[in-house]
Amino acid sequence: MSKRRVVITGLGTINPLANNVSDSWDSLINGVSGIDSITAFDTSELPVTFAGEVKNFDANEYMGKQHARKLDRSGHLSIYATEEALKDAGLDNEERLGPNVGIVFGTGIGGIGATEDAVRTFDERGPSRVNPLAITQLMPNSSTGQVAIKFGIEGPSLTITTACAASANAVGEAKNMIENGIVDMVVTGGTESGTTSMTIAAFAQIRALSTKNDSPQKACKPFDKDRDGFVMGEGSTVLIMESEESAKSRGAEIYGYVSGYGSTTDAYHITAPAEGGAGAVKAMENALKDAGISASDVDYINAHGTSTPANDKNETDAIKTVLGEKAYEVAISSTKSMTGHLLGGGGAFESMVSILSIKHSKVAPTINLNTPDEECDLNYTPNNAVDLEINIAMSNSFGFGGHNAVLVFKKS
Amino acid sequence: MEVNEVFEKVKNLFVEELGIDADKVTMEAKLEEDLEIDSLGIVEVVMAFEDEFEIEIDDEELTDVGTVGQAVNLLHSKL
């Protein structure tokens, strides 16, 4: 039996750049950074004082205080992004999406903010004052459950926590569900809100974060010789994916096809990538094979490109291994240079970027790439967007734990 | 403290702490059906009462509490 083709018919996002898809895209192609000094809490004792925060979003105003209180910020963002995506897909009039719709969400650290708050209360006021909503806010599947309740999604549900690969894995697993006929439609994506004091401190302790506190917008420098770590970001991006037949039968506009998914594990080190990006190579190869294309067919790669010394070098090596000579021609960019690292929400955001790049025939740049690194010598689309007819885009996502998830998107 | 004073304090807690519409909070209002306070929410309400009135409420005391008025009367009896 041949597998069903899977399309994207709706996009929704809230991220450090903007609170909708079109403004996010405008920022991306204009090279605008969404990173700034942290406003959510006092950073005076922290070694890192900046991040990509979502702006102009008040959950109480958006969903009402009574509902907002039940969710962590990562949950608020996921409800918002899902509502946007369903509107975009023309599904906002559905009372309940029902049993033929599934949900697959990714998150790295779930309701970490709620966890921190609850521990603080426990220490300051004792066990009897701990928020009774703490568990339902902090569990990693909180957003999945709350989104399902809000929109009546009754099909299969999964929450994937493969760190920074989580929502790329989510998109891939959603593709599998639809291809195999388990459901016709899946609401998929990811959410993260790790811009909290303890989380920033802990990432800083392992020297994963950039410490360029004096120049937040210029701090995230993927593939640049002076890169010194990633920049924390928050946000949620949701994609409505369905079978081609389902989209056509309801007359939905199709953004493009989710054609390939490769997923591997380094089984090497809990944070460092395997030498030469071995696990990443295999994931890219598997995704190409799944899409039924060869490496030379790829027009654009949305890189994982975190701006850490180790990732960017190993990802570069992996791209060279998979693409051979074509590696020096293919357009590559890291949009994390503008958004920061959305952790478990990154793969879904970058899936959106990939599909919009195809749609608009444009490659968003890697900003802040000024000093070439001899170990990173590919075409990373430095600083300015370029026009390019893109038929096939690939998106790389790699997570702590050694998780690698690669997706391939096609125009037709 | 008079019953109506307790009611005003309770109403204020529901509105300010829990985000419930002020219009909905009457003595007759049912906690679950009218104010959409579910089993998790009840625990929060009790915590808020305990903090506001500096009392302790046992779970058993809540068995017969289904409306705002019943909650107000329980609190009034403990003050």
Image (cartoon, rainbow, N blue to C red):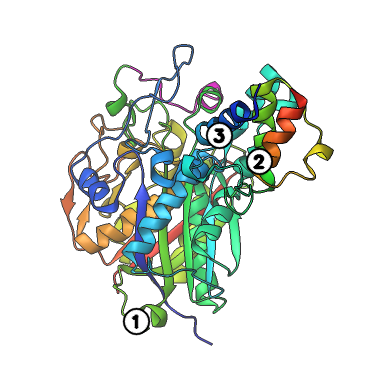
Question: Mark 1 belongs to which subunit?
Answer: A
Query: Is residue A327 highlighted in magenta?
Result: no
- Relative height, residue A311 to residue A332 (above, below): above
Predominant SS of the magenta segment: loop
Q: What amino acid is found at the position of numbered circle 1 in the picture?
A: Lys
Question: Mark 3 belongs to which subunit?
Answer: B
Q: Which residue is mark 3?
A: B11
What range of the chain is rendered magenta? A202-213
Q: What amino acid is found at the position of numbered circle 3 in the picture?
A: Lys
Work out which quarter of the rendered image holds the N terminus of chain A and state it: bottom right
Q: Which residue is mark 1?
A: A248
Same chain for mark 3 and mark 1? The answer is no
User: Cβ–Cβ below 8 Å for labels 1 and 2?
Assistant: no
Position of residue B73 measured from the top left corner of the image (x, y, whole percent): 71, 35
Secondary structure of the residue carrying tag 3 is helix
Q: Which residue is mark 2?
A: B69
In the image, taking residue A332 as reference, residue A245 lies left or right, namely right
Q: Nearer the viewer, mark 1 or mark 2?
A: 2
Q: What amino acid is found at the position of numbered circle 2 in the picture?
A: Gly
- Label 3 CA crowd tier, 10 Å (few <14, some 14–19, many 20+): many
